[in-house]
Image (cartoon, helix red, strand yellow):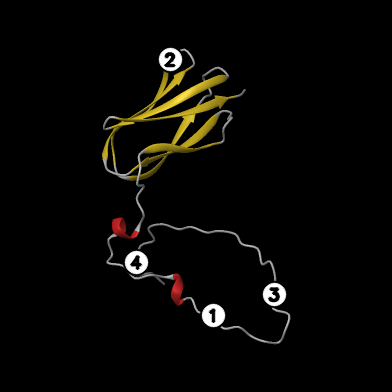
Amino acid sequence: GTTPWTLVDEDSFEFIKLGAITSDEQISWTSGDWFAEGDGNVETQSSLPSEFGLNSVYPNPFNPTTSLTLNLPDANTVNVIVFDMLGRQVAELVNGTMQAGSHTLTFDGTNHASGVYFVQAEMAGQTSIQKIVLMK
């Protein structure tokens, strides 16, 4: 049959059962506490970052790509640039307006030499810098 709704997003996770009840006693549970009702406004239901910044670079060291998380508490114009050790710009990851939230950015070092690079994010007079290491 057909479903009366559209799937917007999907996610999953693995879990491991670490133990079990060894007696004949049964424990009841309910999924009632797993779900919370909201007003339908996704922005109020999700937690937006409270501070601007580049976070969680993975992997680091990397070859040939790495991902960075950019946290934006507000929608704003953002500029994210990658510099080499001599201060030369080697890549521009973002230059424009982005919505509030956590965004994943990817730097591809395929055409760059091994070494230390700096990723600089700027928004509304604020700056965040992360060191990344490309190892070939």
Dot 1: within a 10 Å radius of its alpha carbon, few (fewer than 14), some, or many (20 or more) residues? few
What residue lies at 49% left-to-right and 36% top-to-bottom?
A: 67
Q: CA distance from mark 3 to mark 1?
A: 14 Å
Residue 107 placed where, x, y %? 47, 30
Q: CA distance from mark 4 to mark 1?
A: 29 Å
Residue type for callout 2: Gly
Q: CA distance from mark 4 to mark 2?
A: 51 Å
Dot 2: within a 10 Å radius of its alpha carbon, few (fewer than 14), some, or many (20 or more) residues? few
**Disc marking residue 20:** 3
Which one is in front in this view, the residue at disc 4 or the one at disc 3?
Answer: 3
Residue type for callout 1: Trp
Question: Regarding mark 3 in the picture, which secondary structure is present there?
Answer: loop
Which residue corresponds to mark 1? 29
Which residue corresponds to mark 2? 87
Give the side of residue 78 with respect to residue 56, left or right: left
Q: CA distance from mark 2 to mark 1?
A: 58 Å
What residue lies at 47% left-to-right and 12% top-to-bottom?
A: 86
Say which label, 4 or 2, has the lower sequence index: 4
Question: Regarding mark 4 in the picture, which secondary structure is present there?
Answer: loop
Residue type for callout 4: Trp
Say which label, 3 or 2, has the lower sequence index: 3
Q: Quadrant of residue 2?
A: bottom left
Say which label, 4 or 1, has the lower sequence index: 4
Which residue corresponds to mark 4? 5
Number of marks present in the image shown = 4
Give the side of residue 46 with respect to residue 131, left or right: left
Give the side of residue 64 with respect to residue 76, left or right: right
Question: Regarding mark 1 in the picture, which secondary structure is present there?
Answer: loop
What residue lies at 66% left-to-right and 67% top-to-bottom?
A: 17
Say which label, 4 or 3, has the lower sequence index: 4
